Image (cartoon, rainbow, N blue to C red):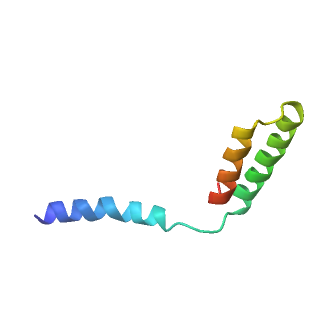
């Protein structure tokens, strides 16, 4: 019984820690997002997005992705 309890705790703690990691993006994540935005702008200059792609981007922006 004790072994099952300890095994359950060992499984749950890393998962809970991952969920509570951090809310603020760090400098590396911000730099990555800036690079992604620049690449998207360059791609859009050559191939304009359609209405479905624009709607998808608006949804991503609304959810913070």
Outermost residue to the left: 1
Q: Nearer the viewer, residue 37 or 20?
A: 37
Q: Is 47 situated above or below 56?
A: above
Which residue appears at 49% of the width and 68% of the height?
20
* Quadrant in the picture for residue 5: bottom left
Quadrant where the N terminus sits is bottom left
Q: Is residue 64 left or right of residue 13?
A: right
| Residue 14 percent across, percent down from the top left | 40, 61
Q: How many numbered marks, from 0 up?
A: 0
Q: Is 38 situated above or below 29?
A: above
Q: Nearer the viewer, residue 3 or 22?
A: 22
Which residue appears at 47% of the width and 61% of the height?
18
Outermost residue to the front: 51
| Residue 50 percent across, percent down from the top left | 76, 36
Which residue appears at 74% of the width and 44% of the height?
54
Q: Nearer the viewer, residue 50 or 40?
A: 50
Q: Is residue 31 left or right of residue 62?
A: right
Quadrant where the C terminus sits is bottom right
* Quadrant in the picture for residue 52: top right
| Residue 39 percent across, percent down from the top left | 81, 41
Outermost residue to the right: 45
Outermost residue to the top: 47
| Residue 3 percent across, percent down from the top left | 16, 61
């Amino acid at each position: 019984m004790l072994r099952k309890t300890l095994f359950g705790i060992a499984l749950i703690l890393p998962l809970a820690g991952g969920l509570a990691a951090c809310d603020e993006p760090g400098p590396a994540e911000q730099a990555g997002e800036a690079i992604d935005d620049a690449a998207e702008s360059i791609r859009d200059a050559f191939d304009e997005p359609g209405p479905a792609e624009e709607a998808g981007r608006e949804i991503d922006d609304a959810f913070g992705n």
